[in-house]
Each structure stands twice: as C-alpha cells, then as structure tokens.
Image (cartoon, grey):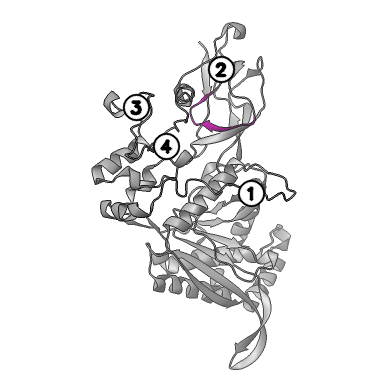
Amino acid sequence: MSIAIKMPALSPTMEEGTLAKWLVKVGDEVRSGDIMAEIETDKATMEFEAVDEGVIADIAVPEGSEGVKVGTVIATLAEEGEDPASVKPASGGAKAEATSSAKVGEPTPEPARGEPVEPPAPASQRSSTGSERTAGDGDRIIASPLAKRIAAEKGIDLATIKGSGPNGRIVKADVEDVQPAAARAEAPSVSKGEDRAPAAAQDFGIPHEEEKLSTMGKVIARRLTESKQTIPHFYVTVDVRLDALLKLRGELNSALEARGVKLSVNDLMIKALAQALLQVPACNVQYTGESLLKFSRADISVAVAIPGGLITPIIVDAGTKSLSTIATEMKDLAERAREGKLQPHEFQGGTASISNMGMYGVKQFDAVINPPQAMIMAVGAGEKRPYVIDDSLQIATVMSATGSFDHRAMNGTDGAELMMAFKELCENPLGLVA
C-alpha cells in the first residue's frame, strides 16, 4: 500500500513552509533516516528525513514552492513489492482542503498545533460558495476553530479583532487576552482592511531590484509588528564600566588557552544577564493574559544574524553554567545557526533575550521584545569615555545597555532593579565565576 508523505510540522509554531529543495527524485529508493528534502520553516532551513522505506512514486509539490501548509501531501512512496508506476499519487488531508478553498478564492490555513479541528459550519451559516460566515459589512472573518470557540465563550465579536495569522486569520493568541469590553472599545478604530498588509510599493521610476522575502523574513516581520502593537514596551538604560570585566576576560582567556576555549565579551554578558534574572526573579517571567509564568531557571536566547534573517539559539540554564561552557556552547550554536542546522529545541523557548550590536560600533539601541518573552537586553559597544571615578574625572571603558520590558508583566522598578543587578555583575565580574 502506498504511503502519503506530508509536509511536516518542524516546529510548534510552524503552519506552513517552503519546500526549498528535493534531494530525491521519482524512482529513487529511500530508507528510514535518508534525507529527502530541505524545508525552510519560520526559523531556519531544516532537513526532512524519511521515516518509511520504499520507492518515490510521485512528487506532488515541486521544489521552491512557498506557503506549503503543514499536512499537505508532498510526495507518495511505494512500499516494498509495489510497482511505483502503478501507484496513484496520494491525496487528501491539507492538500484537498487547499484545492477546495482555492475554488472560492482564498486558501484555508491549517489549524495551528494545539488547535482542534472542528467540523464545517452548518449550511445556514455558510454562503452559497461554501465560504465561512461573513461579517455584517461583507468582509469574510477567517478564524481558527479554537479562536472561534474562545470568542464565543467570552462573548467577543470577531469582527473587532485583527488577526495575526496567515492572510489575517484570527488565531488563539489574538482572542485569549481580549476582554469583551476591550474588544468593543477598540472596534471604532478598526477600519476595513487596516494593518492587514503594508502599503503598496512605489518605486517612482528609481532603478532598483526586487528581492523576495523568505519565509523566515515574513515571519520575523509579522512577529515584530505584533510585538510592537500588542506589548507595552518600556526601556531602562544604564552605563556600565567594563575595565574590570575586560581585565578578567584577558586573564581567563590566558588560563583557558590550553583548552582551546576563548571567551568573548558577549559570553560574559550572557552570564551576567542570566545571573541578574535569578537575582531579580520578577523579570524572569512570561505574561499569559490570565497569569504570570515565573521561571526558576534563566535560559538566554542570543540573537544571531544569519542569511535572510535572525535566529535566537538558547543557552539553557546560563545562570549556573561556567563561562567556559557558555563560550563552547555559544560557538557551536552560532556556527550551526548560520548553517541552518539547529534543531527546534535549540532555538524555541528561552526566558529572556540578549542582542549585542557592539561589534558594529553601535553605541546604544532599543531592542524589540521577542514574544512570548517579557524582556530583552540590548548591548552597545564599549568605548573610552570621560567617567567620574572616586570623585575625579578619568577615562574609562564604558558600555551602554538598554533593557526592553513588557509592562504587563512587570513594573518599572523591577526593570530598574534588573539593570542595576546587571551593571553590578559586569563592574564586579568576579561574581560571574564565583
């Protein structure tokens, strides 16, 4: 019996991806563990391994195809003993739904992982074309089944909600934090089609070339927009004197040279942020809408630039790890991030983030919070500045660091305490190795 090979969910947040490259062709024999394709997710390009054994009888989705929904049949495998030429291409699942939806002009996204599938709406709630029930002004409301159920339970009018999913689809996260009164209050300011798409590009005849956004680029743009629109950011900046930290780094690197380990300034910053979060647990939290998740461990997501976007590999439990371990892990994670070889658990999660642009000579910047986290540290360059030391003006190496905080999850004083703890650890760095 033939086997349908479907678009996998390579991360908990993945709803669709790009089938970047096929590494097999029709007629090829595959075994469990063979790499069949490269798939570009919302985070990275990842290899897709075969689970079953057999011969490729059909490839339904050509390489380079974008927006392939999770669960879509992408190929058919003939099992041992079957004649590949006689095998009919597998069908059904998400592929069939997408074909059906296309007939009415708009694809129906697969439900996000964790959102149950519900049966179609009754005929009385559907139009003659088979599309979902529409709002009073004629606009189609696209929402996941779970989002609809939550909205119904809370008495929320979906017409007042801006969807953050594909094609403006309303998903669980869009409705779970909304109260009915808040939704009604926001309704007058929501105009038809508002914020659903950027303004049309206008080149004004200026010579240019157009570069298509990758799946990752699109997701980053959407998530950053959501972050700034939905999270009330507040910012706290401190100046940190680095002379003692740089001196300690030099001494540690001399001691670690025989082991082939070299500490970067960023490695020490990761450790300092993690320890500061453990000292000020009010900032090591996550806002859920109904409650706060208070973490007892500091897992630091570290921003790493990669071709086509940004990814944040995680140093797990950075507060208790040695500096040499952090340096070794960070080097490995960064290298594999640039090669697109990180596994989902290595870049999903984290309790807080750090972004260092000091190597570019940037003095200070404000970073955008990476939801669902509640804070991110932006680190600038260390530079020689006039600095008052023991009531006298001297020259010191000083760095500006800015924390971006979610005001729903913590107060301004909490953010200030965290920044002071971070400053103290950097200026008295023996605490990082104690």
User: Which amino acid type is marked by label 3?
Assistant: Ser
**Local SS, label 4:** loop
Query: Which of pointers 1 and 4 indicates the residue nearer the eye?
Result: 1
N-terminal-most mark, 4 or 3: 4
How many C-alpha atoms fall within 10 Å of the one at disc 1: few (<14), some, or many (≥20)? few
**Side of 377 where 243 appears, left or right:** right
**Local SS, label 1:** loop
User: Which amino acid type is marked by label 2?
Assistant: Thr
Q: Which residue is mark 4?
A: 113
**From mark 4 to mark 3, how far is it between C-alphas?**
28 Å
User: Which amino acid type is marked by label 1?
Assistant: Gln
N-terminal-most mark, 3 or 2: 2
Q: Residue at x 59, y 29 (%)?
A: 49
Height in image: 237 above or below 144?
below
**Local SS, label 2:** strand
Q: Residue at x 62, y 49 (%)?
A: 309
N-terminal-most mark, 3 or 1: 3
**Side of 72 where 163 appears, left or right:** left
Q: Position of residue 125 (x, y in %)?
A: 29, 29
Kindly indicate whether the residue at mark 1 contacts the one at mark 3 (C-beta within 8 angstroms).
Answer: no
Q: Which residue is mark 2?
A: 76
Q: Which residue is mark 1?
A: 202
Q: Main secondary structure of the magenta part?
A: strand
Q: Position of residue 150 (x, y in %)?
A: 29, 42
**From mark 1 to mark 2, how far is it between C-alphas?**
44 Å
Query: Which of pointers 3 and 2 indicates the residue nearer the eye?
Result: 3
- In front here: 54 or 18? 18
Kindly indicate whether the residue at mark 2 contacts the one at mark 1 (C-beta within 8 angstroms).
Answer: no
